[in-house]
Structure formats: C-alpha cells, structure tokens
Amino acid sequence: MDEKKLQEELQHHVRHTLLPLFNRYGLDYSDLESVLKWKPIVLVIGNYSSGKSTLINELIGQNIQRTGQAPTDDSFTILTSHGRAEGEREVPGSTLVNDETLPFGRFKAFGEQFIAHFRLKKVDVPFLENMALIDSPGMLDAVTEKDRGYDYLAVLGEFAKLADLVVLMFDPHKAGTISETYTAIRSTLPDTSGEDRIVFVMSRIDECDNLSDLVRSYGTLCWNLSQMTGRKDIPTIYVTYAPDAAEPSEILSVWREERDLLKKKIFSAPGFRVNHILQDIDRQVNELQLICEAMSTFSGMGRTMLAGFGKFALAAGVAAFFLTEPIVKALTGIPEEPMISALLKGTVTMQHLWLPLTGVAIVCFVSWLFFTRWSFPRLVRKCQARRAGLVNLDSSYRKNLWTKVEGRVDALLSRARLADLGGVHGRNLNRITRFLGMDLQDYYNKIR
Ligand SMILES: Nc1nc2c(ncn2[C@@H]2O[C@H](COP(=O)(O)OP(=O)(O)OP(=O)(O)O)[C@@H](O)[C@H]2O)c(=O)[nH]1
Ligand SMILES: [Mg+2]
C-alpha cells in the first residue's frame, strides 16, 4: 500500500477513534499529532566538523550548506522542497514555528534565541518532495545553555521525536569523546527516538593515515559507544568519507559500497515513516490503556463497594419502614392508629405511610451522605496511595510506561466523581484493547 495513503488513513483513524479518548483522560498527544502532520524527516546530528553539512550537500547535489573545519554552523536548517510561497527560498524560524500545517509549533517554547537559529531552505530536488533533511549545529565540548542561548539538547530531542531516521556522525579525531554527544546518546535520544531509528556513522575516514589508524579509531568509537549506550552489543557503524574532500586512495575504494549503503538507508527513510507512526501510536495507546485500566479497576472497586453499601441501605431502609413508627409512638404517643393495624384492616392511607416513609428517606439520606462523604473519598485515597495496584505491571515495558502515566492517574483519581463508577471506563478499555489487538495489528500487517 502507498505510504502516503496509509499515513492519511492512520491520521483519520487516530482523529476519530483515539483523540476523544486521549482528551477524556487528559493525555498529551501532541507528539503524535506532530508526526502525523508532515513528511518524513532525516535528522543529521553529530560532532562539530564531522561532515554533516558535507554529507547533506552531497545528497542534494548542491553546495547549499556552508562547510568548514572549525564549528561552522550554529543553526538548525530544514532542507526540503516545501516553500510557503512561490519563489521564497528561505523561511525563517519565526514563520516555521507559527505555521499550523508544520509540526514545529512546540519549538516556540525554546525561545527567541532558538528561533533565530532555525530556518527552512527550499531546495528543488525530486527526493526532497517527499522528505526533509535537517542539518544541525555540531555538538561541542564544555558548552552550557547560556553559551548557546537555548537548550540545545532539548531541541535535539524534539527534532529526534519527529525524525524517522537520526544520522549520528562522528569523525576519527573525536570518536565519541564530545560531552554533548555523550549526553545526547546517554539520555536525550533514548527518551525520544527508538533505537532502530538511529544510524551511527564514522565519517572522514580518508584522514586516517593507514588501515591500522582507521581500525584504532573505529575501535575507540565502538568502545565509547558501548559506554554511552550502556549496551553490550555494538550497533552497526557506517564508515564513510566525502569523495570531493578526500584524496583518492586504496583504502577508500573498499568502503565505497558501505557509503552507498548509508546513502540508500537515508533515501529509504520515507519507508520508515508509517512504522515510526505506528510505533508512536503503539506507545501512546499503551499509555492510554494503562490509565484507562487503572480507572476501570477503580470504578470496579467503587461499584463493588456501592453494591455492598446498597444491600446494607436496603436492609436499613426495610427496618426503618417498620420500626420508625413504633419508636416514634413509644416516645410521643402518635400516631393513634399504627400502620400495621391499618394494614391488617385494609384501611391504609397516606396518613399511615408518611412516618415509615420518612424513616426510609432519612436512612437513604444518611446512607448517601455516608457513602459520598466518607466511603467514596476513602476509596479514592486508598487507590491513590496504592495506584500501582490498579494495573497489571507484568512487564518492564508496562512498568516503564507506568512511571510516565501514574501522575495522570493520580490527577484523574483526585477529580473522581460518582459518575466514574459507571461502566464508561470499562467500555473505553475494551475499545482501546480492541484497537491495540486488531486495528493496529492490521496496520502493521499492511506495511510488512
Ligand atoms: N578529508 C575529508 N574532509 C571532509 C570530509 N567530510 C567533510 N570534510 C571537511 O571537514 C570540514 C567539516 O565539514 P562540515 O561538513 O562543515 O562539518 P559539519 O559537521 O557540518 O560541521 P559543523 O556544521 O560545524 O558542526 C569541511 O572542511 C569539510 O570539507 C571527508 O570525508 N574527508
Ligand atoms: Mg555543518
């Protein structure tokens, strides 16, 4: 199936089936909305002077991005065929973050300094019609937010959420020793982008004096990566060089194929888009399911309690119906003719009934007051205190998601009303479970 059509179909499905539920449970779905909004994105990040802009220029076939040996570029630049108006070659950040049709509205929060370092360049090459490349300022050592004027790593994280492929570049001189790179790999990227979306690249290999120098640099990068990712298995690292900048040599001819693989991977990014969207939907709907499951368990507990309380109130009501009158009569001497004797004579009128019914009404009122003012708030407090017990946390995946949503559950519980004891959460849970089990699976099958 055509990827673009599938994306539209998904967008429609999400809007109609899921958004009302996200709203109902107050779950932020702006990440998902942003991803659904626009075209596939490849984000190129890495050390300063690792060859990011050179690679982008090569892919595009034009010298569009400035390159240089020192930290050269301090802007995030989107390169795509998109243009707001005909003839407009460059769109400033202020326009990008205010354009509803683009997924960059959230970047406004990073402030003026960031917006001044954000832009879109319109490039008329066919492959950029259905995708966008993002060039980024190089990662540096010993910089603070103050130096950059905005939170660079947070910005990187936001772009990584949108990107279908994150190309992370190193060069042999600084094979993974830059502090911003360390933080990006250690925390920013794992939180925002799936592991399968990150491509590690060692560029500028022509600058290695010989093969053993190259092997040493490669080994250093592997070692540093394993330290940074905390994983024992080393991910694939593509090795590459820029043909225009490199002196031709025998070593390079061996790596030509690998360069081609990297380029192929980048050009095939639009193919990962639907998978990326499905992964995001999967994660967000699983979060929603956890919240709904917690609320459904809570409402089940509330209903059980209400049923028990109902039985008690019924028994108390029956007792009140028959006992109110004798008690009042014993205390005050009225009424003259008790309801029971009128009942036996078959002469019962409203006059005989008002006292027993008042007794029943008082019991109902007191029971209701007791339930709403004491039992229900107590149940809410109990569920808030032991909220992890409301859901099934049988896998580390669910435990991870739970840490993200338990605050939301707490907030929903603190606003719980008696209406929450109806079947609405159970029905919503069924809808969500059906979506995850059937609809989403169907979409996964379509892209296989
Ligand atoms: N020898 C050689 N030089 C390269 C290669 N790739 C890039 N260069 C050079 O390295 C320098 C840095 O390249 P850029 O593309 O500007 O690097 P960058 O990662 O965009 O750098 P910043 O934008 O500053 O972060 C430039 O002078 C390029 O000509 C390569 O494969 N081999
Ligand atoms: Mg650059």
Image (cartoon, rainbow, N blue to C red):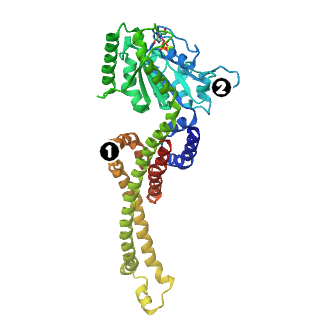
How far apart are labels 2 and 1 at the CA level? 46 Å
Which sits in the foreground, 381 or 435?
Answer: 435
Counting other residues with Cα less than 10 Å from the Cα at mark 2, is it few (<14), some (14-19), or many (20 or more)? Answer: some
Q: Is mark 1 within 8 Å of ligand 1?
A: no
Secondary structure at numbered mark 2: loop
Q: Is residue 376 visible?
A: yes
Which sits in the foreground, 190 or 213?
Answer: 213
Residue 101, percent from left and from top: 62, 33
Residue 316, percent from left and from top: 37, 72
Name the residue at 48% across, 25% down.
155
In this view, the residue farthest toward the right is 86
Counting other residues with Cα less than 10 Å from the Cα at mark 1, is it few (<14), some (14-19), or many (20 or more)? Answer: few
Residue 79, percent from left and from top: 58, 22
Residue 209, percent from left and from top: 36, 6
205 relative to 292, above or below = above
In this view, the residue farthest toward the bottom is 345
Q: Which residue is mark 2?
A: 83
Determine which quarter of the picture holds residue 216.
top left
Name the residue at 48% across, 87% down.
348
Determine which quarter of the picture holds residue 231.
top left
Tell me if 86 is positioned left or right of 311 in this view: right
- Which quadrant: the N terminus? top right
Name the residue at 41% across, 57% down.
299
215 relative to 282, above or below = above
Label drawn at residue 395: 1
Tell me, yes or no, whether the two marked residues, 2 and 1, touch with CB atoms within 8 Å: no
Secondary structure at numbered mark 1: loop
In this view, the residue farthest toward the left is 232
Sequence-wise first label, 2 or 1: 2
Q: Amino acid at mark 1?
A: Ser
Which sits in the foreground, 10 or 161?
Answer: 10
